[in-house]
Image (tube, rainbow, N blue to C red):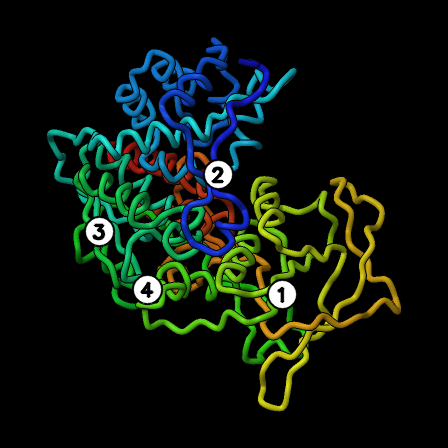
Amino acid sequence: MDVMKKVPVREQDPKVRATNFDEVCLGYNETEATEEASRCLTCKNAQCVKACPVNIDIPGFISKIKEGDFEEASRVIGKSSALPAICGRVCPQETQCEGKCIRGIKGESVSIGKLERFVADYARQKGIKPSKCENTNGRKVAVIGSGPAGLTCAGDLAKMGYEVTIFEALHEPGGVLVYGIPEFRLPKDEVVKKEIENVKALGVTIETNVVVGKSVTIDELMDKEGFEAVFIGSGAGLPKFMGIPGETASGVFSANEYLTRSNLMKAFRDDHDTPIRPGKKVAVVGGGNVAMDAARTALRLGAEVTVVYRRSEEELPARVEEVHHAKEEGIIFNLLTNPTEILVDENGWVRGMTCIRMELGEPDESGRRSPIEIPGSEFTIDVDTVIMSLGTSPNPLISSTTEGLETNRRKCIVADEETGQTSRPGVFAGGDAVTGAATVILAMGAGKAAAKGIDEYLRAK
């Protein structure tokens, strides 16, 4: 065994997986996990832990894998994370824990994410459940949104003895975990639902189809329903568009709508009556993880897919692993390219897209190079469907219906980074509702910080 290199993880063959929605990565088995764990140096001053937004005891759980005590490894992770099977699959470990791994200085970092996934999957398959708080304190806390921030905050508060109710606007809990991330990256029934069941097993109640700001307001939850504190983890689900001609044509989707139809409403399955127009030639505008998800979904629905991004590959914000998988599956990348107009036929449907070539200018003070149009370089792409993946912002419904809740110019709720406290006493917020669209693990970190902040606030009260 070469200790400087990771134990390879098994994956579906690219040609096979491009035609199905089964999970791409197959994960480690017990032998592979133990071998990979043996590469960990068990650092005393572990930089990987400091780089983890939820501060998992990484050397601690990996040491238990080395010993073959996978159940105890799951309990070590469970002290810090309520969603380990999810994080092990979708966290950008390469820029967080693995990015700080000492083993990675001269060789390849330890596959912390794949080991976390292995432990979580083992615990699920063996029916190992998190420990529930024996005695509740009778104090009620409301959590708005059942995405990663809300689930984490609720789980931590329940462990402290609070009576927590999550209010979810959609018909299924999970937030972006169920509507935004494709099945082939994050299985819904096998993984997401099981992790949510674990949070409920801690004593958390989840009420779906409740649109806070319309069905009930935060003021009513606190003044009439007896909730002493509220956490807003409603995410950022309002899509952005470019504002170019033709953008309102039939056949133009936001990535949110496209993925929600496919993921939450099971439009990719023949036995579900949820229409989605896969298109024969699809352009996905954007270069983030959501763009990769939309592109790879369209490919699996039978389309020829091109990713259009205005910067170079070096600036692609998507995870390297996601870009690599997309290329393996046959997705075309048209980089340093920006759309200027969506062409529309006589029936109002997309018939093509005009683009212009870009070049990168001189770096600004932050080192980021802005794309500049090259005059006279316009050309047309032959497409019948366009998916816009340009980022999202928070829905203003909650902030506009809550007294004394401060927002910034981006319509994000203003909250203290360490405690989640907003300008309204007793109301806390975290995740994408505060930062704008970010990662699952950062939302979890915010939910964890807010749970601590709520506990301190209510104890002082």
Which amino acid type corresponds to the residue marked 2 in the rendered image?
Glu
Label 3 secondary element: strand
Crowding near pointer 2: few (<14 within 10 Å), some, many (20+)? few
* Residue of label 3: 206
Q: Nearer the viewer, mark 1 or mark 2?
A: 2
Q: Position of residue 68 (x, y in %)?
A: 32, 15
Asked if the residue under mark 4 is in contact with the one under mark 1, i.e. CB atoms within 8 Å, the reply is: no
As drawn, the residue found furthest toward the bottom would be 346
331 w.r.t. 200: above or below = below
Label 2 secondary element: strand
Label 3 to label 2: alpha-carbon separation: 35 Å
Q: Position of residue 369 (x, y in %)?
A: 78, 47
* Residue of label 2: 11
Which amino acid type corresponds to the residue marked 3 in the rendered image?
Ile
Question: Camera-side residue: 413 or 266?
Answer: 266
* Residue of label 1: 283
Which amino acid type corresponds to the residue marked 4 in the rendered image?
Gly
306 w.r.t. 383: above or below = above
